[in-house]
Image (tube, rainbow, N blue to C red):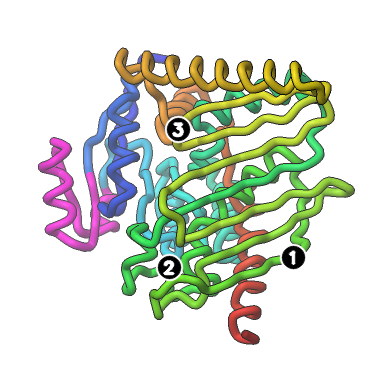
Amino acid sequence: MPTTNLNVAILGCGYVSNDHIKAWKRVHQAQLVAVCDVSEMAAKNMSEFWKIPRYFTSFPKLLEQKNIEIIDICTPPHTHASLAVQAMQSNFNVLLEKPMTMTSKDADEIVQCQKTTGMKAGVIHNWLFEPPVREATALVKKGGIGEVVNVEIEALNTKYDSMTANEKHWCHTFPGGRFSEMLAHPVYLLRHYLGSEISIGDVQVAKIGEYPWMKSDELCATFHVGTKLGRSYASFNMPRAAIFISLYGKKAIIRLDIVNATLNILPARKTSRFNKAFDSLRQAGQLTRSTAKNIMKITSKRWSSGHDFYIRSFAECVLTDKEPPVTVEEGYHVVKIVEQMCGAIDKAERER
């Protein structure tokens, strides 16, 4: 990466901005120079905690600064379109936390503004860049598991999830409720592994938990890409948080555990007792090697999260005039599918 420095401002000082700041601090060519939030206390506290020199409570004032190249937008997604458009029209490159927006109309506004201004604009689809997902993607591209014919994604959360347990969180005011904020993850993974033109097959929801502000807290959805199938299951009632991805290829199966950063490859096998026993030993060996590799990365401070990888890549794209790893056009397509899913959820809840 070139040695030119990038000055970065963080817009929005909520929980997720901490992940962004950590990632930016690992980019040697980037310098955090300002934070901005409508709450002066939030902006001041974040500025002091992370030793960022300036804080603002006015977005227009931030836009007057001439020494900033990137504005990293970490505000709630229904504010993204207006803020991103203002930033790009003021000649700032823009990075957006997912979901890019809550409606396809807002997403299209960002896309059109990016085309008009020519500024760099990207969306953080961070699960795509978690270490085991990147490893799985490389295997798929090499043909290691053959043609992928089915993908299943399980996003499991406990009832103590910070958004779920907060009755006043903004996500509960939108069609789809808590699912409206998180469905981008399985949708962009399905698009990544099955192909871009996925369509929704069926969306089923249920209510198991006790929070009265949540109309649904269980979801199961199916998808189609031609003759191929995909499935997503999401829950806010599990005893532990977990993210599992299963890639079903014609030659082998890959099972990913994103939280524990492990990957298991299940090749074709015969059904004899010997082969079953050998297969169990091979799977245990893969898990042991993945775990050992993760420990080495953590202890040597070489661990790289999905946010780390994406933000480093976005900085490089700004410095070298390349396309962002996830463009706002891709963000638009994901928002469009999520919007349709949330409409189906809302309809099912009203008819229940």
Residue under label 2: 171
Q: Residue at x 42, y 44 (%)?
A: 91
Say few, some or many: other residues with alpha carbon within 10 Å of mark 2 (under 14 / 14 to 19 / 20 or more). many
The answer to whether one can see residue 1 in this image is: no
Q: Earlier in the sequence, mark 1 or mark 3?
A: 1
Residue under label 3: 260
Q: Residue at x 56, y 21 (%)?
A: 284
Q: Please state which of the two labelled residues, at mark 3 or mark 2, is closer to the viewer.
A: 3
Q: Nearer the viewer, residue 90 or 2?
A: 2
Q: Is residue 42 magenta?
A: yes
Q: Residue at x 38, y 62 (%)?
A: 159
Under tag 1, what secondary structure?
Answer: strand
Under tag 2, what secondary structure?
Answer: helix
The reply to whether callout 1 and callout 3 are in contact (CB within 8 Å) is no
Q: Nearer the viewer, residue 301 or 67?
A: 301
Rendered location of residue 232, percent (x, y): 64, 53
Which stretch did the figure color magenta?
35-64
Name the quadrant of the N terminus: top left
- Tell me the distance, in whole angstroms, between the alpha carbons under discs 2 and 1: 22 Å
Rendered location of residue 230, percent (x, y): 74, 49
Q: Amino acid at mark 1?
A: Asp
